[in-house]
Amino acid sequence: MTAVTQTAGRAARRDFGLLWAGQSLSLFGDQFMTLALPLLAVTVLGATPAQAALLPFAMFLPFLPLGLPAGAIVDRLPRRTVMLVCDGVQVVSFGAIWVTAVTGVLSFPLLFALVLVSGCAVVFFQVAYTSYLPGLFPDPGELHTGNTRLALSESSAKAVGPMAAGPLIGLLGVAGALLANTLSFAASLVTLVAIRHREAPPAVTVRERGWVRRDVAAGLKFALGHPVLEPVIACGTVYVLFLSMVETSLVLYCRNVLGLSPQWIGIVVGAAAAGYPIGNLASAFLIRRLGSPRALMLAATVSVLGIVAMPALGAAHGSLGAAGLVIGSIVHCVGEGAFSPISLTLRQTQTPPELLGRVSAVQRFQLWGAVALGALLASVATALAGLETTVWIGALGTILCLPALLRRGIRTAVLTRAAR
């Protein structure tokens, strides 16, 4: 290894460390919102549980109109710059929610609008974020390690964030959680500024009339025509659609059905996420032993079994129901924790660099758009049938993701390996 290569490797690891640290803080702050937003809507603004379910819908709704164009736009811009602008928008959006909540002028329509603005920033950030890492780590092994570490941060945030948010909300109210999330985005912004790595400038192309439509079409054609990536994206879309019904309803399900306090809700939601790090750390081992297609099939199956177990075990109500939710969700999170980095690395290694933003946008458009639709379905189902029925519909619906995955290139790879 030459001195130049060693220097470049150290620089890449330094920049990744900054990206990792900033995202870890931001993801931790995001988990405060998991508890704070629905509780803010219900306890401070007087919203109904069905209205509170519309807040995740507002967060992810922008993925439907903006998800695909965002990929075409990001592929023509410096991805770090896009992330900087998006983090700045997040600081302003959540800062405004905090200020208006503290001063008593916040209303539900204003909260919905500010969450919608935040969602627009999330669209562009996520597309740029998942397309930026391959520029730091061209080697597939290092790339998967980076993806695993970022997934581990997300997992840890899901485990620790709600448990920290519960006592904080109990002590300082929802305003404390809102301020914490605002500061976490500010910290992420600082770490992005400190990153030294600069991507090669995108190829200069003439932006003729209709260039966004043509670029979007190229990304769609590649992603939906790929024999391996398309089943993975389809599986994720179905899975997230129904999982969102469960997750959107979970906080208020714990509060209204199980009768838990904010502190205990935080413990339930956070402890349930303890399975994510196990799945993250197991992902590389599963790839080596099974190959990516079979590893994805196993991870999806484990996740679905855990989700279906959640309402079944939670039917006991009270402390027994809370314990059942934790057990089912830990199993679900082990599967999802393995599936996420495996599918991300597969997408990054199977996609040409010039299409990374657009293919990532296709995936985000379908998955995060499904989150918006799932939240909307949860709102309607809650209004018509109640929280318990909504959780059951979402849990059973996730089973449909398994036949969506076992198709085309994934099916061929699974059957071929099984026959050996």
Image: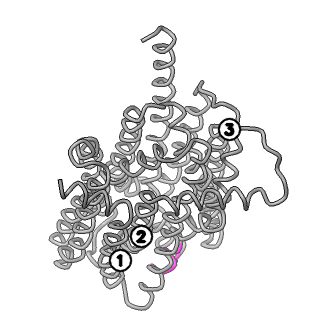
Extreme residue in the top direction: 3
Where residue 305 appears, as percent x and y from the top left, is 22, 68
Q: Earlier in the sequence, mark 1 or mark 3?
A: 3
Residue 49 shown in magenta: yes
Going from N to C along the chain, the mark reached first, 2 or 1, is 2
Residue corresponding to mark 1? 394
**Direction from residue 412 to residue 61 in the image, left or right:** right
Q: Give the spatial CA distance, label 2 vs label 3.
A: 32 Å
Q: Is residue 355 above or below residue 376?
A: above
Q: Which residues are magenta?
A: 46-54
Q: Which residue is mark 3?
A: 78
Q: Position of residue 66 (x, y in %)?
A: 66, 62
- SS for dot 3: loop
At a point 23% along the width and 66% down the height, the residue shown is 306
Residue 337, label in figure: none
Residue type at numbered disc 1: Gly
Check disc 1 and report its element: helix, strand or loop: helix
Q: Measure the C-alpha gap from mark 1 to mark 3.
A: 39 Å
Give the numbered dot on residue 244. 2
